[in-house]
């Protein structure tokens, strides 16, 4: 059985003193650390509220990433009351305000102390088509299918030019297909000028070859566009300039309505 050596009163006293010394040292270290953190925070607040670290005028805000909306216009939309301390600037509030007041998908705000300034980076929604519908006001669509009032651009930029592509019909009718539809017409060699979705059973495109009927929109749509492109290489008996309309509801047997004859011309697969 192992015996435990007795500890003298002197050794016990020294151990107690060492423990008290260690506790005191840890207490002082913690206290100084807390004081240092508090001092730094107070110092940062003090520095940020100095007159030198204040945004005094809109020109101290730099706008980046904008294409359609001018820097001056975006500055007028910022929820900043000049002069304003950099510390009081709320980046999220600025981002939310810009997205609510303009066709902006996202905005980030960076603060700079030397010299005091703000940098606002915006990502605008790029309009790729104008919409026409009996149920809503004139609008614009971006690539993702987000609808925006037309005046959300024209009021902010009087020189804004509408995109050439027109989409006719209620947005709710084509929104579920928009991403695939737009990808297909963007990749098509045939220029598409207008898409009419008013009749859900017959999508009609206005193209450089004339009006084209596609029937109910389906996953077969890219194939129909491919057939349409091949029709530009029809035999010489068909003059593409005389094509009034094209029926591609059955892409394996296209029908042509000619300007001169007004009689449908049935073709085999081009």
Image (cartoon, rainbow, N blue to C red):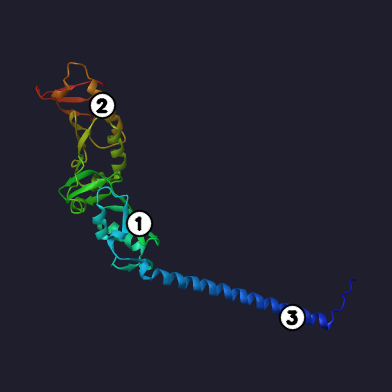
Residue name at image x 54 percent, y 75 percent: 35
The CA distance from mark 1 to mark 3 is: 58 Å
Precedes in sequence: disc 1 or disc 3:
3
Total marks drawn? Answer: 3
Q: Is residue 170 above or below residue 243?
A: below
Mark 1 element type: strand
Tell me which residue sits at (18%, 52%) in the image. 151
Helix, strand or loop for disc 2 = helix
Closest to the observer, 38 or 9: 38
Q: Earlier in the sequence, mark 2 or mark 1?
A: 1
Image quarter where the N terminus lies is bottom right
| 233 to 125, vertically: above or below | above
Q: Which residue is mark 3?
A: 17
Residue drawn at x 24%, y 45% is 173
Pointer 3 with pointer 2, Cβ within 8 A: no
**Relative to the observer, which residue lies in front, 266 or 195?**
195
Residue 229's disc number:
2
In percent of width and height, residue 102 lies at 25, 55
Image disc number at residue 119? 1
Q: Is residue 177 visible?
A: no
| Percent of width and height locating residue 236 | 19, 16
């Amino acid at each position: 059985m192992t015996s435990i050596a007795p500890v003298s009163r002197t050794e016990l006293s020294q151990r107690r003193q060492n423990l008290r010394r260690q506790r005191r040292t840890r207490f002082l270290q913690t206290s100084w650390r807390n004081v240092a953190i508090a001092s730094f925070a107070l110092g940062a607040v003090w520095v940020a509220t100095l007159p030198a670290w204040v945004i005094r005028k809109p020109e101290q805000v730099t706008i980046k990433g904008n294409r359609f909306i001018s820097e001056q216009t975006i500055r007028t939309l910022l929820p900043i009351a000049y002069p304003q301390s950099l510390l009081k600037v709320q980046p999220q509030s600025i981002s939310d305000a810009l997205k609510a007041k303009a066709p902006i998908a996202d905005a980030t705000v960076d603060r700079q102390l030397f010299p005091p300034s703000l940098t606002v980076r915006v990502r605008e929604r790029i309009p790729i088509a104008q919409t026409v519908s009996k149920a809503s006001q004139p609008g614009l669509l971006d690539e993702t299918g987000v609808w925006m009032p037309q005046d959300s651009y024209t009021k902010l930029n009087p020189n804004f030019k509408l995109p050439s592509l027109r989409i006719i019909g209620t947005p709710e009718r084509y929104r579920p297909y928009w991403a695939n539809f737009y990808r297909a017409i963007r990749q098509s060699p045939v220029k598409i000028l207008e898409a009419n979705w008013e009749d859900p059973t017959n999508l009609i495109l206005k193209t450089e070859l004339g009006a084209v009927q596609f029937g109910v929109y389906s996953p077969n749509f890219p194939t129909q566009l491919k057939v349409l492109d091949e029709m530009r290489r029809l035999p010489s008996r068909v003059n593409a300039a005389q094509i009034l309309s094209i029926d591609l509801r059955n892409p394996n047997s296209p029908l042509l309505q000619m300007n001169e004859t007004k009689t449908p011309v049935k073709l085999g697969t081009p």
